[in-house]
Image (cartoon, rainbow, N blue to C red):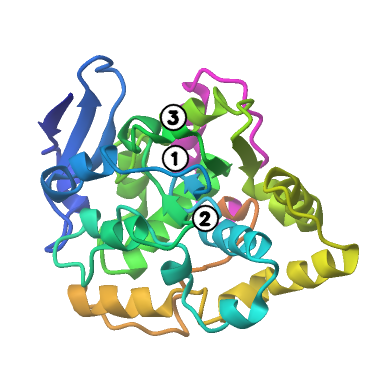
């Protein structure tokens, strides 16, 4: 079903660490031009289980390439689907309400099995994934539950992905080398281009809603209404306004049920990197165009070329 190629370039080796190593390129045998970078641990322990996972019509999935507004979208979708239940939202961690399907398949020695957590959630299940189309459950395309896909301009995504690796103790190298690895499709879950293109091509299917992070930043109320309509929910304008306050960047960043402090602490204990909440937040800046203050000219040019080589008609918002 899949070809597995071990990645051993210097750029890839620089990304590896004691709990996340043995990067591989996974390609479908019937379409070898497609691929995804994952770990051998995922291949050995999770890939087949996820492909064979049972899917239900009332599932709600949020799928993204990493660092494209996933956490933000998860909380919005869960709140809309659960009748704006603020009390429950403030008592249960987002990763328990809305599990990250393949998380324990990425890194060795992860403290619990996120696949089993997602699989066994009471229906309707809310599930998050960063996997590309060809590694997601086969039944997702026959049962056709609701899928919300979110993307972001690749420059901001790449910068945020770099800081994510750096601050979780997953990467000690230079930013330029990380950007090189990103544009060469060597970082985890790469390539971003194909990840986005494949969902862009099916965006008109009735069970797919395609969103942009930048639109959420510029007019959150408008995007909330899109999701409401997609999820067949109806709320009054004052309820939408209250939800937008709950979903504001400052609110999300300070909310311990959403900001993933517990995940950061777990990763810190695994990597031995001391966690300082004053210096690092999982929800970092949440800006559109933040890359302009972060990228050196050479790094910016590399990402320009990366975006140009993707043959699709998405007009990213920069």
> Mark 1, residues whose alpha carbon is within 10 Å: few (<14), some, or many (≥20)?
few
| 170 to the left or right of 127 | left
Q: Position of residue 262 (x, y in %)?
A: 37, 79
Could you tell me if residue 58 is visible in this image? yes
Q: Which mark is residue 70?
A: 2
Disc number lying in front (3 or 1): 3
> Mark 2, residues whose alpha carbon is within 10 Å: few (<14), some, or many (≥20)?
many
Where, by quadrant of the figure, is residue 141 drawn? top left
Q: Which mark is residue 4?
A: none
Q: Which mark is residue 298?
A: 1
Disc number lying in front (2 or 1): 2
Q: Position of residue 293 (x, y in %)?
A: 58, 56
Which one is earlier in the sequence, the residue at label 3 or at label 1? 3
Q: CA distance from mark 2 to mark 1?
A: 28 Å
For the residue labelled by badge 2, is the local secondary structure a helix, a strand or a loop? helix
Q: Which residues are magenta?
A: 292-318
Towards the viewer: 205 or 119 = 119
Towards the viewer: 317 or 116 = 116
Q: Position of residue 235 (x, y in %)?
A: 82, 61
Q: Position of residue 96 (x, y in %)?
A: 42, 70
Q: Residue at x 64, y 42 (%)?
A: 211
Could you tell me if residue 296 is visible in this image? no
Q: Is residue 124 magenta?
A: no
For the residue labelled by badge 1, is the local secondary structure a helix, a strand or a loop? helix
Q: Which residue is mark 3?
A: 141
């Amino acid at each position: 079903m899949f070809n597995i190629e071990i990645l051993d370039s210097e750029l890839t080796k620089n990304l590896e660490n004691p709990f996340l190593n043995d990067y591989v390129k996974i390609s479908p045998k019937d379409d070898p031009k497609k691929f995804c970078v994952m770990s051998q641990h995922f291949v050995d322990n999770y890939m087949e289980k996820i492909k064979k996972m049972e899917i239900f019509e009332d599932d709600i999935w949020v799928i993204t390439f990493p660092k494209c507004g996933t956490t933000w979208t998860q909380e919005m979708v869960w709140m809309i689907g659960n009748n704006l239940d603020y009390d429950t939202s403030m008592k249960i961690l987002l990763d328990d309400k809305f599990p990250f399907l393949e998380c324990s398949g990425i890194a060795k020695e992860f403290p619990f099995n996120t696949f089993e957590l997602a699989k066994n959630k009471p229906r309707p299940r809310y599930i998050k994934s960063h996997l590309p189309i060809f590694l997601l459950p086969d039944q997702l395309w026959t049962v056709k539950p609701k899928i919300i896909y979110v993307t972001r301009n690749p420059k901001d995504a790449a910068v945020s992905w770099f800081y994510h690796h750096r601050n979780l103790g997953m990467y000690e190298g230079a930013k330029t080398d990380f950007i090189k690895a990103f544009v060469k499709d060597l970082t985890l879950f790469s390539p971003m281009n194909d990840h986005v293109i494949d969902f862009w091509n099916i965006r008109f299917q009735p069970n797919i809603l395609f969103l942009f992070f930048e639109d959420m930043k510029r007019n959150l109320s408008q995007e909330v209404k899109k999701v409401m309509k997609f999820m067949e929910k109806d709320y009054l304008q004052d309820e939408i306004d209250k939800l937008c306050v709950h979903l504001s960047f400052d609110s999300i960043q300070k909310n311990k049920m959403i900001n993933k402090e517990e995940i950061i602490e777990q990763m810190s204990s695994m990597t031995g990197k001391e966690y300082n909440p004053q210096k690092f937040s999982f929800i970092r800046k949440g800006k559109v165009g933040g890359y302009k203050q972060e990228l050196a000219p050479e790094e910016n040019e590399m990402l320009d070329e990366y975006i140009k080589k993707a043959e699709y008609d998405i007009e990213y918002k920069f």
